Image (cartoon, rainbow, N blue to C red):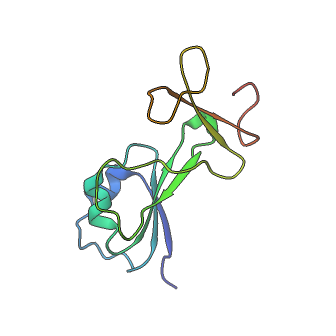
Amino acid sequence: AAITLAVIPPTVVASLPPDALLPAGMSLIVGTEALPPETVRTWARRHRLFNAYGPTEAVVNSATWQVPEEWTGGPVPIGPPDVNKRAYVLDSALRPVAPGVLGELYIGGPGLARCYL
């Protein structure tokens, strides 16, 4: 049986040679640190690639973005919130900000430890 799914930090994926013998078409979930666009370009050609984002307090993954086949580059999104998670971008007074306005990301929902937003 072949490996069909691997969860790997971006620095490990980036250190692999582009012709590494990973089964073609396998799914790679890459997370725990920022995912550089160069890594996405290299690995999304042959594999289903997912960017998994989340702090430890939120049980590591809070949002996941699947790289679409037509991705052409640019900043790598963190994606929509995962099941049982909600994401808010708030200002310093904890008020929601408008789309495109800078703020701080807050994660909430039943998938979080008690006493976290």
Query: Going by the picture, which residue comes out furthest to the top?
Result: 93
Q: Position of residue 68 (x, y in %)?
A: 42, 66
Q: Position of residue 51 (x, y in %)?
A: 45, 54
Query: Going by the picture, which residue comes out furthest to the front?
Result: 98
Compared across the picture, whether 27 is left or right of 11 comes to right
Q: Of 80 and 33, which appears nearest the observer?
A: 80
Q: Of 6 and 112, which appears nearest the observer?
A: 112
Relative to residue 80, is residue 102 depicted above or below? above
The C terminus, quarter of image: top right
Compared across the picture, whether 59 is left or right of 39 comes to right
Across the whole image, how many numbered discs are drawn on residues? Answer: 0
Compared across the picture, whether 21 is left or right of 94 comes to left
Q: Position of residue 94 (x, y in %)?
A: 61, 19
Relative to residue 103, is residue 72 depicted above or below? below
Relative to residue 86, is residue 73 depicted above or below? below
Query: Going by the picture, which residue comes out furthest to the bottom?
Result: 1
Q: Quadrant of residue 26?
A: bottom left
| Residue ID at (63%, 51%) | 82
Q: Quadrant of residue 89?
A: top right
Q: Of 102 and 16, which appears nearest the observer?
A: 102
| Residue ID at (74%, 24%) | 115
Q: Position of residue 113 (x, y in %)?
A: 72, 33
